[in-house]
Image (cartoon, rainbow, N blue to C red):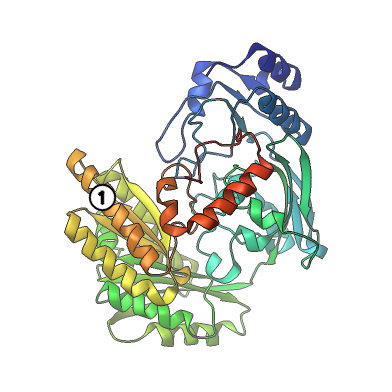
Amino acid sequence: MTLPPALLDILRHAFAADALSVDEGERLAYAYDNSRRNALPDAVVFPTTHEQVETLVRACREHRVPVVARGRGTNTTGATVPVEGGVVASFERMNRILRIDPDNRLAVVEPGVLNGDLQNALKPHGFFWPPDPTSSPWCSIGGNLACNSAGPRTVKYGSPRENTLGLRAVAGTGEGFRCGTYTSKGSTGYDLTRLLIGSEGTLALITEATLKLAPKPSALRTLRATYRDVGAAARAVARIMAQPVTPCALEFIDDVALKLARDYGGDGVPLAGAMLMIEVDGEPETLPSAVDAVSRAARGDGLEELKVAQTAEETQALWSARKALSPAQRTISPNKINEDVVVPVSHLPELVDGIKQLAAKHDVLIVSFGHAGNGNLHVNLLPRDDAERERAHACLAEVFALVIRLEGTLSGEHGIGLIKREFMPLALEPATLGLMRNVKAAFDPDSILNPGKLLP
């Protein structure tokens, strides 16, 4: 696609010279995300105001040109790849923290604010925003909202949907609107805020978010439990989540992942059938009883060792296996297929066992780890050549079918994007998909917002 001259004139008038680029080198930098898929946009703009976004969307709608919103491109599903060309709107310059309001436990931010920068700004006030993806130093709040990206703390504190009060956005019609409240309670019409979160930029472009803050707990304790096999660890997860004390993180790492991490990170990483990383937070006077309750649940058939960190250094050492995993996987396969399926916690043992069987059936190396307290498992297929890549894709379809049989769904926090779009009919019945298409048509009647994503 080549942009119509009339559209380029409007964009040049709305955006300063350094805020609009049609240079091929710069466009290449916005052609891909962490999925490694790519497609070249026809232009890139860098809005700094809500009004600019309105102008952009109205002009692109008039000329039937796609608009793709982009944060920092850390997503793994191709959600920000401009598959039909058009204009990429990069929100990296719309990065102001507009308001921190401890009295009302909220913060108002622009979409380009980095998650890590927001957390640092909230620390002196004694608060934090619970969503904490592994990519928090680099990912943006807008991207977190677009994909409902969460992280380990979700098990106790919830995802962006549970931690966002309101939004300002621009629909595919070019019309700006606000939704939600500045209050923790509200029952006034349809909940458009939760609808937009996780919609991957297919309904509207978010230009401002009012976030719900949580008080930062004053104490934290880290535990590491190793088990004879993955089944024993998965059963321990179900026991931990069935008792009253909710951990703030409960991470699962299988035997293949542990061996890989040890090869990369050294013998500080234990070898075992599986491992759980558990964190409990709270006030100092209540923490010992909480740790004791979680420890009792972690013990059981198949437990090999349970360690409780007493210092910050020991905590860091216990987390060494988890931190070594991503770089270790890259040494094996640059073509890693990274999925984040989720099932009810009680079905986690069946999911873990089923994935082991599928890995053997298709002769594909699979590393499994993730946020077990939510039943959210990161299933990483690591093909090393063309033959293994072909087997991996066949295996992936069976992984998704297994997840649906176990009453789960296709994604816990990465979203659907381009890569999982074809599998949506597995997870949702035709009537549900039809209603979603009707919602899309109401917000974006000409389908210019992030076309080719999410809905099959």
The answer to whether residue 337 is above or below residue 298 is above
The residue wearing badge 1 is 394
Q: Is residue 308 visible?
A: no
Left or right: where 155 falls relative to 89: left
Badge 1: few (under 14), some or many (20 or more) residues near its Cα, within 10 Å? few
Q: Secondary structure at mark 1?
A: helix
For the point 41% across and 60% down, the residue is: 341
Instruction: Please name the amino acid that badge 1 sits on.
Output: Ala
**Quadrant assignment, res 286:** bottom right
Q: Residue furthest top?
A: 5
Front residue of 133/200: it is 200
For the point 21% across and 53% down, the residue is: 364
For the point 58% across and 17% down, the residue is: 22
Front residue of 54/117: it is 54
Left or right: where 200 falls relative to 272: right
Q: Position of residue 399 (x, y in %)?
A: 32, 59
Q: How many numbered marks have been drawn onto this rendered protein structure? A: 1
Left or right: where 62 falls relative to 311: right
Q: Is residue 42 visible?
A: yes
Left or right: where 92 falls relative to 268: right
The answer to whether residue 254 is above or below residue 168 is below
